[in-house]
Structure formats: structure tokens, C-alpha cells
Amino acid sequence: MGNSVSFTIYGEPKGKGRPRVSVRKCKNPDGSDRTFSQAYTPKETVSYENLVKTEYRLQCGEFIFPDKKMLDMRIQAFYPIPKSASKKQRERMINHEVRPTKKPDSDNIIKIIADSLNKLAYHDDSQIVDVMFRKFYAEKPRVTVTIIGLED
């Protein structure tokens, strides 16, 4: 595996969800009300992060880039072809003549992948100095990730 690793996350591309906030009320020891809020990560985001980690471990094993190594991350997101697409439109989508302009946004997909791989593929996603992101349509939705260690 040396200087690069590649793996695939099967299924529809997902983006990092915004943190949610719950507000709770409780009583202070003196009987007065106290309100506090707590931020949490949406379940769908946690599930997808776990899927990314699982696929990385299955396909790349225990490989981890050295601390401080500069990294180039390349992500290709393959979205499902809409059932409503005509035969002609479907063909154009498969041939990458028509590409997705729908959510999730590229930045949210990059974020969920990069965050998921912290302490697993690399020490910290701050090591990523280059990112290439591309969206396509495909018969089988998936996200492919390649991480390349750059020369010092």
C-alpha cells in the first residue's frame, strides 16, 4: 500500500449533518428552573461515519499515514440515477455528460469522509493539503476515496 490507499463506500453518498441542539429544563437545588442546551450529532451522520470507518478497515487494514505527512485526498461520489430519467437521459448520465447538481454538497461529503478517517487513516485531517472532489451518476451509488502521501 506504501504511498497511497483507496477504498469504496457502497451506497448513496451522504454528507455531514449539522449538529442538532436539544434544550432541557431541570430544577436547581433551590427549586428554581434551569435551562441548558446540548449539541449532538444526528444519527444518520454517526451511521455513515461508522460505515466509512468499517470500509476503510476492511479494504485498507491497519494502514495509517505517518503524523505530519502531507496528504492529497481524491473523492468521487456516484449518485443513483433517478427512476424518472428517460432512456436517453439515463445514457447521458452513465456517460458522465450529465452530472449531479443536487445535495449533499461536495463540502459536506468531504467533511464526513475526512472526519471519519481521523486517527484511522491519518493522525488528523489537517494533514490533507489537496482535495479533488467529483460528482457523477452511476447504476451503483458509491463513494470512492484515494489518499496519496505526498513527498516531503
Image (spheres, rainbow, N blue to C red):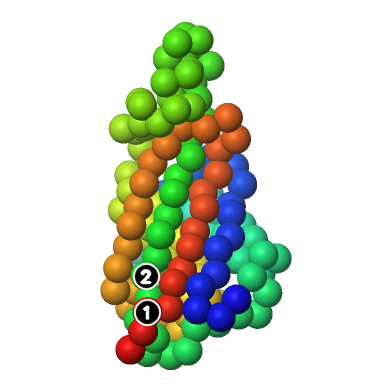
Q: Is residue 129 visible?
A: yes
Instruction: Identify the residue at horizontal 55%, vertical 63% (top origin).
Output: 6
Residue 16 percent coordinates (x, y)? 41, 54
Disc 2 target residue: 72
Kindly check if marks 1 and 2 are in contact, taking CB atoms under 8 A apart as contact. yes
Q: Is residue 29 visible?
A: no
Vertical placement of 117 versus 93: above or below? below
Vertical placement of 27 versus 140: above or below? below
Q: Quadrant of residue 149?
A: bottom left
Secondary structure under tag 1 reads loop
Instruction: Identify the residue at horizontal 64%, vertical 61% (top origin).
Output: 55
Residue 90 shown left or right of residue 70 in the figure? right
Q: Residues within 10 Å of mark 1 (few under 14, many from 20)?
A: some
Residue 14 percent coordinates (x, y)? 47, 46
Instruction: Identify the residue at horizontal 59%, vertical 42% (top origin).
Output: 11
Secondary structure under tag 2 reads strand
| Of 121 and 24, the residue lying toward us | 121
Residue type beneath disc 1: Leu
